[in-house]
Image: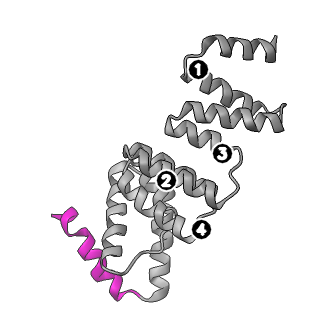
Amino acid sequence: LVRELFNAAFLSCWNELTESAQEQLVRALNTALASPSIPPEILQMLLNLAEYMEHEEKPLPIDNLGNHAQRCHAFAKALHYKEQEFQINNSNVKVIEDLISINNQLQLPEAAIGVLLFAQQRHPVELAEGRWYEKLGRWDDALKAYEDKQKEDPTSKELLLGRMRCLNALSEWESLSHLICDTWI
């Protein structure tokens, strides 16, 4: 009964709090949500509360709801909050990467590809492009992106490791062996 009435009880108390008390409560909720030792069921309950308050048109100003939802594998909620972040700042590379990853977790590859295409059209996509293709499981595209970037920066270890991951995923053992030998032997 307590769990079922929690959101409604919170809303009724929230409406009676002063603005400073609401700010204090939001700080406490942010602290609780950011705690690495918060039990997943409590985290889920607080995320449900945030969603309920949003539906009641009294959204709580809680930071990083998308990240908190990802922590407890609530990917549909994480997608909702990350999309809100994306609408506010669609040039944030971390948000774009998170959207691609969450869409993959939800088995929505077309949506993940759409986010990637949007990012490519609107923003100069740098090294992240190879990682994004990797997250999409598009190993040929990722390999090509890493190879193209490595022509510009032949000493980059990160690009080299990206190429190796792609060759491994594509089971191109001979090419991987040659790359390793050329690099470290």
Mark 2, Cα crowd under 10 Å, few <14 / some 14-19 / many 20+, is few
Q: What whole-number distance in Å separates the C-alpha atoms at marks 4 and 3?
A: 17 Å
Residue beneath disc 4: 89
Given residues 85 and 68, the one toward you in this image is: 85
Residue beneath disc 3: 128
Measuring from the top left, give residue 61's x and y in whole percent: 48, 74
Do the residues under discs 4 and 3 have CB atoms within 8 angstroms?
no
Q: What whole-number distance in Å separates the C-alpha atoms at marks 2 and 1?
A: 26 Å
The mark found on residue 114 in the picture is: 2
The mark found on residue 168 in the picture is: 1
Q: Secondary structure at mark 2?
A: helix
Given residues 77 and 181, the one toward you in this image is: 181
Measuring from the top left, give residue 101's x and y in whole percent: 49, 46
Q: In percent of the image, x 32 and y 51: which residue is there?
A: 41
Q: State the image quarter where residue 60 is shown.
A: bottom left
Magenta residues (range):
1-17
Q: How are the residues colored?
A: one colour
Q: Earlier in the sequence, mark 2 or mark 1?
A: 2
Q: Amino acid at mark 2?
A: Gly
Mark 4, Cα crowd under 10 Å, few <14 / some 14-19 / many 20+, is few
Measuring from the top left, give residue 145's x and y in whole percent: 67, 37
Q: What whole-number distance in Å separates the C-alpha atoms at marks 1 and 3?
A: 19 Å
Q: Earlier in the sequence, mark 4 or mark 3?
A: 4
Q: What whole-number distance in Å separates the C-alpha atoms at marks 4 and 1?
A: 35 Å
Measuring from the top left, give residue 68's x and y in whole percent: 46, 55
Q: Name the quadrant of the C terminus.
A: top right
Q: Earlier in the sequence, mark 3 or mark 2?
A: 2
Q: Secondary structure at mark 1?
A: helix
